[in-house]
Image (spheres, rainbow, N blue to C red):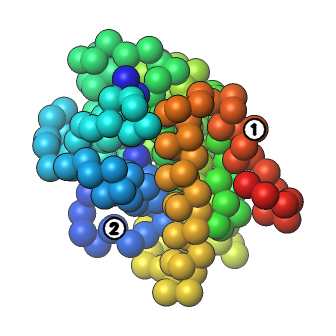
Amino acid sequence: MRIIIGLGNPEPEYSRTRHNMGFDVINILAEKNNIDLSRTKYNAIYGTGIINGEKVILIKPQTFMNNSGESAVEFAKFYKEEINNILVVYDDMDTEIGTIRVRAKGGAGSHNGMKSIVSELNSEDFPRIRVGIGRPKSEYDRIDYVIGQIPEEEYIELQKGEKIAVEATEYWIKNGIDNTMNKYNIKPNQEGN
């Protein structure tokens, strides 16, 4: 079984913001694979289904970003799942818009949602997919940048990264993290995907 957690903020005003890339990827995965995301448990919206022959649980924590780990740890405990079978998908300012980075493990960086996940799971040893949102022109704009509304032209570019993240997630389910890193961690100017 695989547990896939997308990070975001639950209120409608955050639905089309850079900080909700994780939620967007979960929504696309659910729609593409006919998984009903209407159940609630552990302060999260979730759904179960099959992707690439594996049972999956798609989760969107509803605690707001800074407390995302509270839901994650409850699902991990309930299903007694190995840490390497828990994938977290989230936005990343250090990754270019329209691209992703896949990691087998690592620190949380400056992302508060990931800080909460790492803290609650008491581990950095879980795979993650970072969806690129690029950086604001100045650090002063950082909060507005991640939770502010996105111009249509840029939203189209962000959706390219979401699409790749969906593909990478499905690939991870079937092929594991090492193969997924090898396939998807390439520079935008390199050939292929």
171 or 154: which is nearer to us?
A: 171
Using a 10 Å C-alpha cutoff, classify the residue at mark 2 as few (fewer than 14 neighbours), some (14 to 19) or many (20 or more): some
Q: Quadrant of the C terminus?
A: bottom right
At label 1, which amino acid type do we have? Asn
Q: CA distance from mark 2 to mark 1?
A: 33 Å
Q: Which residue is at a point 57% across and 46% down the rendered structure image?
A: 168
At label 2, which amino acid type do we have? Tyr
Q: Which residue is at a point 39% across and 39% down the rendered structure image?
A: 51
Q: Position of residue 182 (x, y in %)?
A: 75, 38
Element at label 1 = helix
- Look at the image and tell me whether residue 115 can be seen: no
Q: Position of residue 77 (x, y in %)?
A: 29, 16
Left or right of 136? Residue 170 is left
Element at label 2 = helix
Sequence-wise first label, 2 or 1: 2
Q: Which numbered mark, 2 or 1, is in the foreground of this view?
A: 1
Mark 2 and mark 1 residues within 8 Å of each other at the beta carbon: no
Residue for badge 1: 182
Left or right of 80? Residue 121 is right
